[in-house]
Image (cartoon, rainbow, N blue to C red):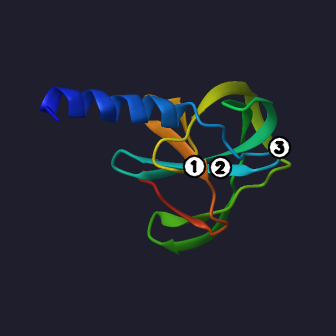
Amino acid sequence: MTDLAAVGALKARQRADTRRPHALTEGDILSCSWCYEQTNVDFYVVVSVPSPQFVTLRQIAAPLIEQTGHMQGTRVPDPDMRKGKELRRHVDMSGGTASIKISSYEYARMWDGKPQHVSWYA
């Protein structure tokens, strides 16, 4: 197989993976950790599942539950404290797990249930 054919086959598999149905259900909580001189964590709850490839999400608040050091701590989401408006997003299943692009720098994945580390400055 030529390199060009191998690349074409890989791209075809990746396209097929992104179109695979997801297993997310209403009420699932997703987390998204992103950084720039500090560690931010955002949480989202699945509000509805309009199709096998899309979900409707809404951001939820995550109060600080413990300060673990100078300008750092842990947060857990509170599903009852919803923020902002609903977002309809495509669920990418490439790699075998659900990944949702929230913005150019944020990708949400299923929350593991553990408190998430955050840090801040000033």
Q: Residue at x 58, y 45 (%)?
A: 98
Residue tagged 3: 26
Q: Residue furthest right?
A: 80
Residue tagged 2: 30
Image quadrant containing the N terminus: top left
Which of pointers 2 and 1 lies earlier in the amino acid sequence? 2
Residue tagged 1: 109
- Label 2 with label 1: CB-CB less than 8 Å: yes
Whole-Å distance between the Cαs marked 2 and 1?
5 Å
Percent across and percent down for residue 102 are 55, 32
Mark 3: few/some/many CA within 10 Å (<14, 14-19, 20+): few
Mark 2: few/some/many CA within 10 Å (<14, 14-19, 20+): many
Q: Is residue 33 above or below residue 69?
A: above
Horizontally, residue 98 falls left or right of residue 13, namely right
Q: Residue at x 57, y 30 (%)?
A: 19
Percent across and percent down for residue 11 are 34, 30
Provide the secondary structure element on which disc 3 rests: loop
Percent across and percent down for residue 57 are 72, 34
Percent across and percent down for residue 27 are 82, 48
* Closer to us: 1 or 3: 1
Provide the secondary structure element on which disc 1 rests: strand
Horizontally, residue 15 falls left or right of residue 87, namely left
**Amino acid at dot 3:** Glu
* Closer to us: 107 or 33: 107
Which of pointers 1 and 3 lies earlier in the amino acid sequence? 3
